[in-house]
Amino acid sequence: MTYNHPKILVAIDCLVFGYDTTENNLKVLLFQREVEPFAGEWSLIGGFVNEDEDLSDGAERVLEKFTGLKDVFLEQLSTFGKANRDPGGRVVSILYWSLIKLDDLHRDIANEHGAKWFDLDQLPELVVDHSEMLKLGTEQLVHNAKSRPIGFELLPEDFTLPQLKQLYDAIYGKSIDDRNFRKKILSTDLLIKTDKKDKTTSKKGAFVYRFDTEKYNELRKQGYHLDLNV
Amino acid sequence: MTYNHPKILVAIDCLVFGYDTTENNLKVLLFQREVEPFAGEWSLIGGFVNEDEDLSDGAERVLEKFTGLKDVFLEQLSTFGKANRDPGGRVVSILYWSLIKLDDLHRDIANEHGAKWFDLDQLPELVVDHSEMLKLGTEQLVHNAKSRPIGFELLPEDFTLPQLKQLYDAIYGKSIDDRNFRKKILSTDLLIKTDKKDKTTSKKGAFVYRFDTEKYNELRKQGYHLDLNV
DNA sequence: ATTATAAACGTAAATTTAACGTTTAATAAA
DNA sequence: TTTATTAAACGTTAAATTTACGTTTATAAT
């Protein structure tokens, strides 16, 4: 080691949003802390960074531990580092956020770790500055929904336009005009219409679509910037 | 200390943008590292976080040391934490960015610390991942210019519309239509027109304006969101 | 007076947004 | 076998915004 400076505990906290297509609402994964201080209280999922571990690898490790998931949307959001934020000691915590497709499997794995999915409007008190983290993440979700195709991270690969609209309704917290939404989302030319119909919510059935990830990535390389300001 | 986990060096790096109103271009503050590894090579200004110091306080300390400035635009951007990013040891570095009004005083203070202002198109090689940091910061600058009044952080309190336009030209790297720019910026109703004229660049002289920070902060509280997508 | 020129002001077509109304496909009831 | 029902899909139009230009004005130098 060349440097001679104070060393500090570095943690990862991960804010996981999941969308429940049956309930049509957004949820957040929380778990009950096992160690003092705040043992038993609700917290974002998290853990400490290992000596030889990239931050991003640490975030992936934490996420997989609590959800069993790899290779999903996972990005760094912000770092929290007030000197006295954690009474347990000086901890600098890097906040990541993740978007996943909710299903029963993830509920089971979460359960095994004392983790639970909470509706956004029924959140418990959170430890330390985790409420602040959640506020930041929620803002980020709204903001990103306008400029990136994050909706498709939260829905199954196959989805209908009414489903997609309901998701955006949930994110924006208001009901978008469905005719304008349809026009805007289809005008991007990034949805692939299949000939399948989903009849779970209507007699007529809604056509099943798929997001054209390949095309989107190609366009991105050419400087394309999505605009879903609905 | 309650926790028993590996401790890691935590550093602050600060990307400082300055705008030179006489040269009409954006500059970045860099300094020559004094310690190994990479002693003598160019780097963003930075330092290690103290044991009992908030991250934001550390960033303010670093910025003041190299520029003499307090109470200027200074925000966290992102955290860099690859395990092997720094051959000198495991260092997690939190990147901050700052926007300041360039003048001779800051050049002098910078000089005393072996720091120098570089044009954005004449940058030297940078240590570790600092080029990546600079890329991120530049993107952030462009992005923020559209949705926040950051231009006024880079200009003197008194400025003219042609000056403001030239700044935005520099940020966006293209020449905006001055008639449309004027309309858009004035339509926000956030500029206070004074009866003073600046005649340094024309016989006619350009009216001096001031940004209405108070009004902007008031509007922000009410959910207002600036849109300068010129 | 005349000229030069940056600064300030103006306009109109094209595009986008916002706010609605209408038709269609399938099922279930009459 | 009609008819009613309803989510899904499609359509229209006025208002607002953006884009791309042309014109006038104030001042110093000639």
Image (cartoon, coloured by chain):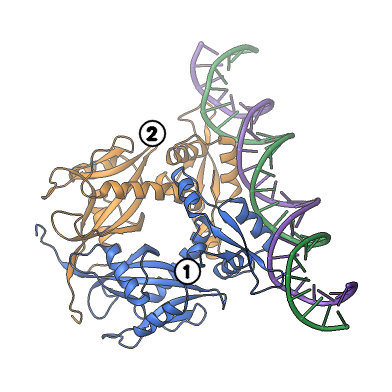
Chain colours: A blue, B orange, C green, D purple
Residue designated by label 1: A138
- The vertical placement of B3 against A2, above or below, is below
Residue designated by label 2: B22
Identify the chain of the residue marked 1, using the numbered disc in the image. Answer: A
Identify the chain of the residue marked 2, using the numbered disc in the image. Answer: B
* Pointer 2 local density, CA inside 10 Å: few below 14, some 14–19, many at least 20: few
Side of B34 where B197 appears, left or right: right
Identify the image quadrant of the N terminus of chain B: bottom left
> Do tags 2 and 1 sit on the same chain?
no
**Spot occupied by residue A81 in the image (x, y as percentages of width and height):** 29, 68
Distance, label 2 to label 1, CA atoms, is 42 Å
**Secondary structure of the residue carrying numbered label 1:** helix
**Spot occupied by residue B64 in the image (x, y as percentages of width and height):** 26, 54
Q: Nearer the viewer, residue D12 or A122?
A: D12
For the view shown, which residue lies furthest in the bottom direction?
A40
**Spot occupied by residue A169 in the image (x, y as percentages of width and height):** 60, 68
In the image, what residue type sits under mark 1? Thr
Q: Nearer the viewer, residue D1 or B198?
A: D1
Side of A170 where B120 appears, left or right: left
Determine which quarter of the picture holds residue A173: bottom right
In the image, what residue type sits under mark 2? Thr
Disc number at residue B72? none
**Secondary structure of the residue carrying numbered label 2:** loop
Point 45% across, 50% down: residue: A217
Query: Viewer-nearest of labels 2 and 1?
Result: 1
- The vertical placement of A179 against A167, above or below, is above
Point 44% across, 45% down: residue: A221
Side of A71 where A122 appears, left or right: right
Point 36% across, 49% down: residue: B137
